[in-house]
């Protein structure tokens, strides 16, 4: 089964968070066909494991042991992502520099869709509101990033 791990809070300031380190980490955990996408914690991989929660726990327990940091990880499969795209939650709203379309993934298996007016509201305020409502066990990706993840998954 093909999955994507969406790791919250990955940034270039920590060398252990770079794509090559994350790819090596996933391979050491026994996952195959590991690929990273962008530098924001999107790792595509294959596994014989079927339970996404078990995969998330396995990753989260080993991140501090092997890479020295803790992060929330949310796992989805190809079907989950294509179902989100097919549902067309934004109904014709376009992703522009002034209007960002975001998908926030929750540990509960659900998603929250938001449109961020970057001129008047800003990303920070929206993210703070999402955390206040849903807690910190979330991670957000842009609509365009979801499309890129699906495309990369289809290249396998």
Image: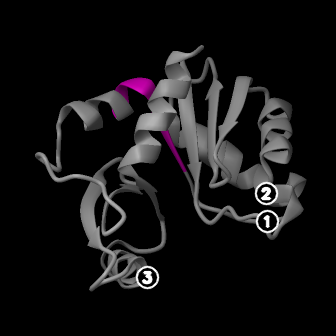
Residue at figure coordinates x 27%, y 30% from the top left: 83
- Between the residue at mark 1 and the residue at mark 3, the CA separation in whole angstroms equals 23 Å
Magenta stretch bounds: 74-80
What secondary structure is found at the residue carrying circle 2? helix
Residue at figure coordinates x 35%, y 32% from the top left: 80
Residue 69: which disc? 1
- Tell me if 11 is positioned left or right of 143 in this view: right
> Which is nearer the eye, 125 or 92?
92
Contact check, label 3 and label 2, Cβ < 8 Å:
no
- Find the residue positioned furthest to the top: 156
> Which is nearer the eye, 70 or 145?
145
Check the image and tell me how it is coloured: one colour
Q: Which residue is mark 3?
A: 124
Compare marks 2 and 1 and give the one earlier in the sequence: 2
What secondary structure is found at the residue carrying circle 3? helix
- Between the residue at mark 2 and the residue at mark 1, the CA separation in whole angstroms equals 9 Å
Residue at figure coordinates x 27%, y 58% from the top left: 112
Which part of the image, by quadrant, shows the N terminus?
Answer: top right
Q: Within the magenta stretch, is there residue 88?
A: no
Compare marks 3 and 2 and give the one earlier in the sequence: 2
Q: Residues within 10 Å of mark 2 (few under 14, many from 20)?
A: many
Contact check, label 2 and label 1, Cβ < 8 Å:
yes
Give coordinates of residue 8: x percent, y percent: 58, 61
- Between the residue at mark 3 and the residue at mark 2, the CA separation in whole angstroms equals 22 Å
- Tell me if 102 is positioned left or right of 88 in this view: right
Residue at figure coordinates x 36%, y 24% from the top left: 79
Give coordinates of residue 75: x percent, y percent: 51, 41
């Amino acid at each position: 089964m093909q999955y994507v791990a969406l790791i919250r809070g990955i940034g270039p300031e920590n060398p252990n968070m770079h794509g090559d380190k994350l790819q090596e980490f996933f391979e050491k955990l026994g996952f195959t066909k590991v690929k990273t996408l962008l530098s924001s914690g999107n790792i595509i991989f294959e596994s014989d494991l079927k339970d996404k929660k078990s995969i998330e726990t396995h990753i989260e327990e080993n991140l501090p042991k092997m890479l020295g940091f803790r992060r929330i990880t949310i796992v989805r499969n190809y079907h989950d992502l294509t179902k989100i795209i097919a549902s067309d939650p934004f109904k014709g709203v376009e992703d522009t520099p002034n209007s960002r379309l975001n998908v926030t993934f929750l540990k509960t298996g659900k998603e929250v869709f938001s449109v961020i007016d970057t001129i008047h509201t800003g990303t920070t305020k929206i993210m703070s509101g999402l955390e206040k409502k849903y807690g910190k066990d979330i991670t957000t990706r842009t609509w365009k990033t979801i499309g890129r993840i699906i495309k990369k998954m289809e290249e396998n």
